[in-house]
Amino acid sequence: MMVARAIARIGATFIYALIWLFGRRRRRTDVPWLDGPIGERTIGDAPYRDVADREGLELVRDAADGGLVPEFAVLDPEARVNPLVREFYEHTTRFAMDVWSQTYFPARIGLWLLVTTISRQVNQLNFPLTPLETAHGLASEIILLRRPDGSIRYTGWFRTLAEHARVLYTGFYMTERPPHEAAPCVKVVFPMPHGNATVILRASFRADGSLDLDSSGRRFGEAGFYRVHARDTERIRVWRVATLRERFHVFVDDAGTLRCDHDVSFLGLRVLRLHYKMFRRDPSARSGSAAAA
């Protein structure tokens, strides 16, 4: 444990050095499209409570009905997507999921170092390193953070690896239109100590009604992965990690089953693939699954 903590401190220092070296200094008011929750030393599920208190929001844990994108028409005004895909995003609580994972050499070495040191110390982004880690499934909770007028400021998706109760994602979902994108994008913020990792995903639709979400932008202000470090209450330093890319393909297969392929690559190398099978949750079993989550 002491060795892991020492390596985690070295790794965190290395990441902060990269942010300082490659990042840009920005005033928060100049990049409102990057505004998002900032984490404390340890993450877990604490950011949901902290953000609700800080912004005066109502916190609804284990929401009875809620979705990652409450109004999917923001992304798809022409209604091109398959209705089942739309239902999943607008009513995520209706669905349970099975998941399979695969890591790839040589990038899995770096992923292993990141997860076994930094991720486990801060309890955030504990990506599965072997298929067996997802064999017992994921515990999933949708958390709503509402403004006083009842509108949703953030949708939280809190997911843990069921067997070890390690946090896979403490995520805040919203839609945002960055300055160099032609249409609104999906924005996901993952709080990290003294900052966050913000992923902006461009949405596109295929002829078969499936959805692509892709972070492959080309410049600052487009879709991409942005590592944010809070310097103080007014200033941040932002590193757009152009070589880190995520892509989701959400589709309905020939048997009518909703599925998703999630690919992560770095420096052109595939790092991780997650495959999800989503299916409607049995309402009678919901209370038991909520307790497990």
Image: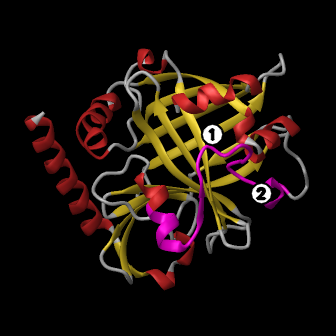
Q: Position of residue 235 (x, y in %)?
A: 36, 81
- Taking the spot 10% from the left edge, 43% from the top edge, the residue there is 6
Residue type at numbered disc 1: Phe
Mark 2: amino acid: Leu
Front position in the image: 143 or 77: 143
Q: Is residue 272 above or below residue 76?
A: above
Cα distance, mark 1 to mark 2? 15 Å
Residue 143 inside the magenta-drawn segment? no
Which numbered disc flags the more N-terminal residue, 1 or 2?
2
Mark 1 residue crowding within 10 angstroms, few (<14) / some (14–19) / many (20+) = many
Residue 86 position by quadrant: top right
Q: Residue furthest right?
A: 78
Is 68 part of what is drawn in magenta?
A: yes
> Residue at point 75% right, 39% down?
88
Residue to which mark 2 is pinned: 75
Coordinates of residue 228 in the picture (x, y in percent): 39, 65
Quarter of the figure that contains the N terminus: top left
Indicate left or right for 147 with 31 as reference.
right
User: From which residue to which does the magenta span run?
Assistant: 50-76
Give the answer, above or below, for where 285 lies relative to 56: above
